[in-house]
Image (cartoon, rainbow, N blue to C red):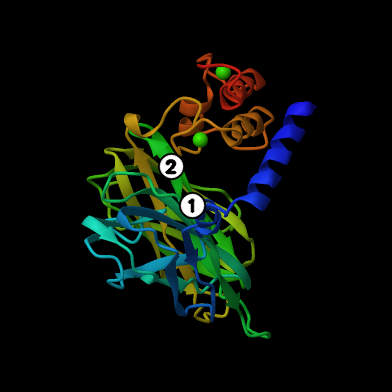
Amino acid sequence: MKKPIVGILAFILTVCCLPVPLHITAAATIPMPVIEITSVSGQTGDEVAVSIIMQNNPGVAYLKLKIDYDSSLSIVRADNNDVLSGTFTTSKTTAVKPYVLQWMGASDSTENGAIATVTFRIAEGAVAGDKPVTVTVEECYNESFDAVDFSVSNGRVTVNTSSGDEPFPVIAASSVDTLCGEEVTLDISLKDNPGFAYLKLLIDYDDTALTLIEASDLGIIGGVFTTSKETTVRPYVLQWMGVSDSTGNVRIATLKFRELKAGITAVSVSVAECYNAEFGDITIVTENGIIQVLSAPQYKLGDPDRDGEITVSDALTALRVAAKLADVNELIMATCDVDDDGEVTVSDALRILRVAAKLANSL
Ligand SMILES: [Ca+2]
Ligand SMILES: [Ca+2]
């Protein structure tokens, strides 16, 4: 007990009797560098722009940001505002999620302000509410190769729908992550279905990246279900024909693909024709699916969220899968089944947790 008191007394004496050394006050008041995403609002179908703002910039030569966002938003473009000098690069396509923005210069930039502007489109079928837009600083160095720490402040896009508007019906393909060489199943879902008797969907994709194995009707819609004769036909046709209006919501069909190579492939869905029983035309909004195929080095055991670190969150994911609260897919199996017995159990979750809590050095 004595030592801390002696220490405190010594500190008080130092503060009272000596001029305060300048470096102490300076260290205490250096503000934390911050990267902030602004918040905006818009209507469904609108384009809205959020700014990425840098404050208290201590000087950066290399900065890599990852932008993630709600699935009812899609990126239209990202613009560099020339606040940071150096070469500006982004993910190859705006479909890549999270989207990467990167600046690389030979010397430090010390400017503050809106370093980039990211324009999002709000999906026609988006429900009203706040849609998060988050930023993660993946890496940041100054010209001396010292890491620079930032605190981040996330933003949101607030979607307003004018009251009284009927929501557009939506047909959406799901997005999945999988491993190279595996089969993957994409869901086609229907929301806000006003009732239709005839629906013709066209499915298209890059056939150098994916092979369609089969399409299955889930029997929700009713009527006669037909498809293109061969799975190699592109665009591939899915067609439902009934005599009365079907009003089912939820999953209506599944598409099973085999992956041919690592990368990101969009599976596009478009409505060729849709009528109700009175032959009235129905406008349907579509949302494309994305299949992200990971090659082996892109995942590691015990890291299902693939952020490169084994944390409590990874253990919780394994626990949810073990408790059947989350789906098992190839990726989950490959990352969560750390004891390699072919299933994800509480024992796998505990092994991950021990490593996350630094109670064990390896899985
Ligand atoms: Ca992780
Ligand atoms: Ca296991």
Residue 263 versus residue 223: which sits nearer the camera? 263
Q: Position of residue 257 (x, y in %)?
A: 37, 41
Give the spatial CA distance, label 2 vs label 1: 50 Å
Residue at image point 39% right, 69% down:
112
Q: Amino acid at mark 2?
A: Asp
Residue 164 versus residue 314: which sits nearer the camera? 314
> Label 1's element?
helix
Residue 311 in which image quadrant: top right
Residue 220 in which image quadrant: bottom right
Is residue 39 toward the left or the right of residue 119 in the image?
right
Residue at image point 50% right, 58% down:
30
State the residue position of label 1.
23
Residue 306 in which image quadrant: top left
> Mark 2, residues whose alpha carbon is within 10 Å: few (<14), some, or many (≥20)?
some
Q: Position of residue 122 (x, y in %)?
A: 49, 73
Q: Position of residue 37 (x, y in %)?
A: 49, 67
Query: Disc 2, disc 1: CB below 8 Å?
Result: no
Q: Position of residue 67 (x, y in %)?
A: 43, 58
Residue 27: tell me if it is visible.
yes
Which is closer to the viewer, label 2 or label 1? 1
